[in-house]
Amino acid sequence: MAHLIRHKISNKISSAASGASDRSRAGLSGVFARLGFQAATDDEAVGFADCDDLDLDHRHGLRLDVLGAEDGGDSRYQRDAAARRASAGSAGSCVELEAQDKPKITAWEAGWNVTNAIQGMFVLSLPYAILHGGYLGLFLIIFAAAVCCYTGKILIACLYEENEDGELVRVRDSYVDVANACCAPRFPALGGRLVNVAQTIELVMTCILYVVVSGNLMRTSFPALPVSQEAWSVVAAAALLPCAFLRSLKAVSRFSLLCTLAHFAITALVVAYCLSRAHDWAWDKVKFYIDVKKFPISIGIVVFSYTSQIFLPSLEGNMQRPADFGCMMDWTHVAACVLKGLFALVAYLTWADATKEVITDNLPGGFRPVVNLFLVAKALLSYPLPFFAAAEVLEKSLFRDGDGDGPCPGCYAPGGRLKPWGLGLRVGLVVFTLLMAVFVPHFALLMGLTGSLTGAGLCFLLPSLFHLRLLWRKLQWHHVFFDVAIFIIGGVCSVSGFVHSVEGLVEAFRYDVED
């Protein structure tokens, strides 16, 4: 009996230690795998929230890269069993079996994820892009949809290689794996590190944008109160500070689902209001002209609104039929293009040259506070998703937890509790987003800067470059032409948008100081 008791106690201790190790072992591919899932309950996506365990106690079960193909899938798209075993590594066969037991998603559920990823609350700045581009701004919305759809497909194509039987075998699992494969053998980790930096910047900038838009919406909702936008941003950051202590996003994700649905309803209300003023639409204001100074910023805004490439590999890897991925990308981007174009056009026609950076600022006083309060709630509940992903990437880079190889000691104590320096990192990240929102409270400029710097790189430049590098011998001439053209256009747009966004921010900062 005593031996049995000692055996049970030993098993419990081993299980606890294993759980703590699993909680700290989340690799970067797992982080962005979860990004694809968690987005389902947030700005980015909601279709399969039920099969998405957001609790940090089940991190190892969220590794989409070890999911096998289900029966009934396309036989040309197979998962590489050796790669699965390697990716599972020391996690053991139990982890692999647990991951394989998780249900996969249909093409419709994947499409719902992508649709919400590219139709979040950042579409509120699209009318501002029409203000500085006219009909060419509408063309840009269509062009960006076509390019992002194409680059999403070729990024997924880079995950596969043909075996001896001519079957496509999935030999890579993430954006980082593709980048590392392109830089091998001379610099096998350089590509992944560059992608890591770009993804981290985009996640942190997304957090900053949520704080900025919260302060902006609150200021315009209650203009009679003697409270500045910066002060409202401080209030928003104070409400977000508990994110540093959260160990589970499950409760937040459920509220985010409701806020996502509310966002679609609010967008419909804004469109309905614009349609009610159709007799006053300023068609003569929409012209074929470009504001040379501000149109490149509009490019970044539009590109950022289509960003979804970060989690596409994980999403495709979890589909029941990977062969349906291309069709799913087609109809989701067509739908997004139509809805974004109509929303941007009718909103601009309603307010013309008075169109503001966030279109809800143009709503009448009695209607505006109600809409803005819902959007603020959505922004605050959307913040934990990119915050968690960015925090875990930084933890993996800085601390020696699990497979992390950072220079600092581990930030997790036994039982998964954060040590003081780990908690300090998360609190510092919240404070950093607040400081950026206070000193650079310009939503459209920040969005344009992010879209030009990381959005264009992740959506335009890198997928086309990787496609040419990995599949050069198998590409037809028109694919080579498209890849080269997209790389050149993306590079020009990225540099131009970045330069003009920085100039706009410097000018806005000078104006704020003088004011």
Image: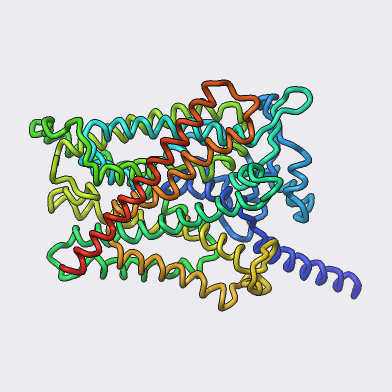
- Locate the C terminus and report the quarter of the image it occupies: bottom left
Left or right of residue 85, residue 437 in this image: left
Task: Choose between 407 and 214: the one closer to the eye.
Answer: 407
- Residue furthest to the top: 477
Q: Name the residue: 39% across, 28% down.
A: 334
**Based on the displayed image, in which of its 4 quarters is residue 25 positioned?**
bottom right
Residue 255 drawn above or below residue 110: below
Rendering coords of residue 160 (x, y %): 66, 33
Q: Name the residue: 33% across, 29% down.
A: 338
**Colour convention:** rainbow
Rendering coords of residue 295 (x, y %): 27, 42
Left or right of residue 484, residue 501 in this image: left
Residue 167 drawn above or below residue 53: above
Q: Name the residue: 46% across, 27% down.
A: 330
- Locate the N terminus and report the quarter of the image it occupies: bottom right
Rendering coords of residue 38 (x, y %): 51, 50
Rendering coords of residue 469 (x, y %): 61, 36
How many badges with numbers are in the image?
Answer: 0
Residue 84 drawn above or below residue 21: above
Task: Choose between 15 and 453: the one closer to the eye.
Answer: 453
- Residue furthest to the left: 280
Residue 370 drawn above or below residue 486: below
- Residue furthest to the bottom: 420
Task: Choose between 261 and 499: the one closer to the eye.
Answer: 499
